[in-house]
């Protein structure tokens, strides 16, 4: 596959999106045959959805087009190194590999710095900027117990 060609496409999507006053990010998902099966542009402010990053949009579209929740034989191309949220989505989608153009440093210089999130992940829950609290309820395992009882569940 021509990785440069696909990356240039993501940059075109990102530039086009920036011209439309949306975030300067673009992504595509390509199947094992080289077909683009998902595209995404950052739509966070346009949709008031903080999860509407280009990579997530492309993954959602590719999954819908393939009628699956796993992209095991697909490659993600993105105009910028994925943020922690997108990294999680990439792993959940089981994408085979990822190619990116700009790195975290270029993103930070452009006003999109997620270093604080990487730092927060490693902090104790009560030391985070947004503290996390666990409440010990006796029913806390009920959803998982119910899940294990289901015979027709789809593992993922």
Image (spheres, rainbow, N blue to C red):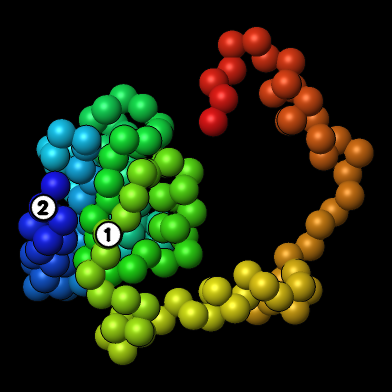
Mark 2 vs mark 1, CA separation in Å: 11 Å
Q: Which residue is mark 2?
A: 2
Q: Are marks 2 and 1 in contact (CB under 8 Å)?
A: no
Image quadrant of residue 121? bottom right
Image location of residue 117, percent across then percent down: 54, 74
Q: Please give left or right for residue 128 compared with residue 68 in the image.
A: right
Q: State whether residue 115 is above or below residue 71.
A: below
x, y percentage for residue 128? 69, 76
Residue at image point 14% right, 47% down: 1
Name of the residue lying farthest toward the front:
1
Left or right, 14 with respect to 110, comes to: left
Secondary structure at badge 1 equals strand
Q: Which of the labelled discs sits on residue 86, or is there none?
A: none
Question: In the image, what residue occupies the spot 91% across and 39% down?
Answer: 138
| Foreground residue among 1 and 65 | 1
- Residue sitting nearer the eye, 72 or 57: 72
For the point 13% across and 66% down, which residue is it? 11
Provide residue 18's location: percent of width, then percent of height: 15, 72
Q: Quadrant of the C terminus?
A: top right
* Secondary structure type for disc 2: loop
Residue 13 appears in the rendering: no
* Residue in the foreground of this view, choosing between 101 and 22: 101
Q: Give the class, few, some or many, for how many residues have Cα within 10 Å of label 2's Cα (few <14, many ≥20).
A: few
Dot 1, crowdedness within 10 Å: few (<14), some or many (≥20)? some
**Is residue 131 shown to the viewer in this render?**
yes
Q: Nearer the viewer, mark 2 or mark 1?
A: 2
Q: Which residue matches tag 1?
A: 99
Outermost residue toward the top in this view: 151
**Rendered view: 51 above or below 15:** above
């Amino acid at each position: 596959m021509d990785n440069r060609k696909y990356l240039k496409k993501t940059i075109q999507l990102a530039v086009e999106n920036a011209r439309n006053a949306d975030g300067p990010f673009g992504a595509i998902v390509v199947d094992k045959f080289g077909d683009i099966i998902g595209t995404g542009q950052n739509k966070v402010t346009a949709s008031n959805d903080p999860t509407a990053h280009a990579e997530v949009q492309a993954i959602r579209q590719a999954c819908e087009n393939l009628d699956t929740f796993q992209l095991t034989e697909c490659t993600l191309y993105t105009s910028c190194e994925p943020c922690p949220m997108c990294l999680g989505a990439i792993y959940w989608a089981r994408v085979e590999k990822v190619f990116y153009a700009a790195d975290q440093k270029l993103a930070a210089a452009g006003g999109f710095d997620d270093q604080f999130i990487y730092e927060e992940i490693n902090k104790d829950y009560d030391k985070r900027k947004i503290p996390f609290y666990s409440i010990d309820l006796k029913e806390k395992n009920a959803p998982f117990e119910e899940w294990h009882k289901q015979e027709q569940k789809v593992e993922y």
